[in-house]
Amino acid sequence: MESVNETTQLTAKEQADLKNKRLGLKLLWLVAGSLLFAFALVPLYDVLCTLTGLNGKTSNTAAVLAKAKVDNTRWVNVQFTSNVMPGLGWNFYPKQPNVKLHPGQIETVIFIAKNITNEVVVGQAVPSVTPGIASANLKKIECFCFVKQSLNPGEEKEMPLRFFVSPDLPKDVSDMTLSYSFFPAVKDN
């Protein structure tokens, strides 16, 4: 009987080795889970931004445009601002500082960009809409922010923004600001 107990019982070293193996497997699962989460984070953030309008990301589908009706009973004032981040070497500004429109009415606004350097410069615009509740109701149909923009030395370019404000915009919101920040584009490898 004693010999059976001795073979089923593990020595202290064997118990420690078994615990270490279990800990190693748990840590391996933690690392694998963290890597999966890291890869899933960008698409999840993209979905969150699209649903909430966070970070100026708005829906730009044709289906949204097709069901939008113009609300002639009220006006919305949309102001435009622009920033150029250090290192870009551009002048960038809206041709008109604001536009007054009815929700559902399609409007086109022109932004001007000029490369003030002696080399080709590529930039990417990032939009931001305030107040936050209004961002989900700004629908861009055409925007220079959808793709990287390249300007030759001294080149000046008109960049259109075609958009509308959804009639679903809460009635108490009559002013909104659409701001674009132009960043140097990350080079593709």
Image (tube, rainbow, N blue to C red):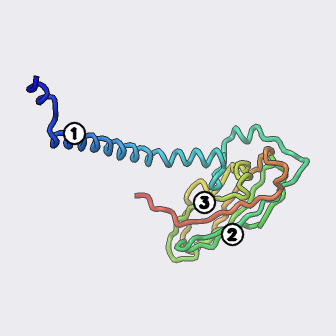
Q: Are the residues tagged 1 and 3 within 8 Å (C-beta)?
A: no
- Give, as a three-letter code, the residue at label 3: Val
Q: Residues within 10 Å of mark 3 (few under 14, many from 20)?
A: some
Closer to viewer: mark 2 or mark 1: 1
Left or right: 80, with 18 as reference point: right
Q: Nearer the viewer, residue 40 or 143?
A: 40
- Residue 163 vertical position relative to residue 123 in the rendered view, above or below: above
Q: Nearer the viewer, residue 16 or 6?
A: 6
- Give, as a three-letter code, the residue at label 1: Leu
Across and down, in percent, residue 62 comes to 69, 40
Q: Secondary structure at mark 3?
A: strand
Q: Residues within 10 Å of mark 1 (few under 14, many from 20)?
A: few
Which residue has dot 2 on it? 93
Q: For marks 1 and 3, give the CA distance.
A: 53 Å
Q: Secondary structure at mark 2?
A: strand
Q: Nearer the viewer, residue 54 or 34?
A: 34
Q: For marks 2 and 3, give the CA distance.
A: 14 Å
Which residue has dot 1 on it? 18
Across and down, in percent, residue 163 comes to 73, 52
Across and down, in percent, residue 44 comes to 53, 45
Residue 33: name its quadrant.
Answer: top left
- Give, as a three-letter code, the residue at label 2: Tyr
Residue at position x 62%, y 46% from top? 50
Give the mark nearest the N terminus, 1 or 3: 1
